Image: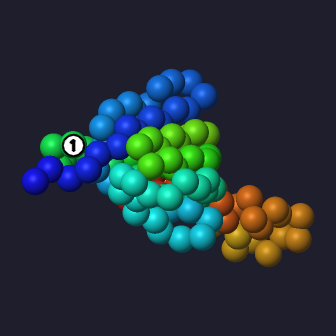
Amino acid sequence: MAEKQFKLEIISPDRSFYSGAATMIEYRTTEGEVGVYAGHIPMTQIIAPGVLTITDADGEQKKAALMSGFVEILPEKISILAETVEWPDEIDKKRAEAAKERAEGRLKSGDSSIDVDRAELALKRALVRLSF
């Protein structure tokens, strides 16, 4: 018996990233890791940097780096409005490594003028990109 499906739309400012049927998605929110199936109760969530896993209608899993945005969950459709989302082959590893080193340097510096929250977020984004 086939798993129940829902329509998944992922949109970023510069493109329609993904549109298709899915049986499950997994991602990170500000409240923790989440997995959603069709028929989920309606809700909205805030995305935190992490890996997005899409299980499509054929059972194949696709992974992407999802950095920030919002999710709207309806029983038959899930929409993700992403500030930044990238397929693994789109990630510039050298740039991500440089961003990681910069963020770590800022955090270790002890400089009181450093925006610690911003540096920690930059480090999280770099680590997600480097996880591919």
> Picture quarter containing residue 36?
bottom left
From the viewer's side, name the closer residue of 95 and 3. 3
In x, y percent, where is residue 97? Answer: 49, 53
| Residue 65 appears in the rendering | no
Task: Tell me: residue 109, above or below residue 35.
Answer: below
Residue 34: where, in percent of width, then height? Answer: 46, 65
**Who's the residue at 79% across and 75% down the image?**
110
* Residue at the extreme right: 113
Whether 34 is drawn above or below 68: the answer is below
SS for dot 1: loop
Extreme-top residue of the structure: 15
The image quadrant that residue 113 belongs to is bottom right
Front-most of residues 102 and 26:
26
Q: Is residue 114 visible?
A: yes
Quarter of the rendering occupied by the N terminus: bottom left
Q: Residue at x 81, y 62 (%)?
A: 115
Query: On the rendered structure, is 131 left or right of 119?
Result: left
Residue corresponding to mark 1 = 57
Q: Residue at x 77, y 67 (%)?
A: 116
User: Residue 109's spot in the image, x, y percent?
Assistant: 75, 71
Q: Amino acid at mark 1?
A: Ala
- In the rendered structure, the answer to whether residue 68 lies left or right of residue 2 reads right
Give residue 103's quadrant in the image: bottom right
The percent coordinates of residue 52 (x first, y second) are: 41, 52
| Residue at the spot 54% in from the left edge and 71% down from the top edge | 32
The answer to whether 53 is drawn above or below residue 115 in the figure is: above
On screen, residue 5 above or below 110:
above
> In the picture provided, is 117 more to the left or to the right than 93?
right
Question: Which of the pair 6/65 is nearer the observer?
Answer: 6
Crowding near pointer 1: few (<14 within 10 Å), some, many (20+)?
some
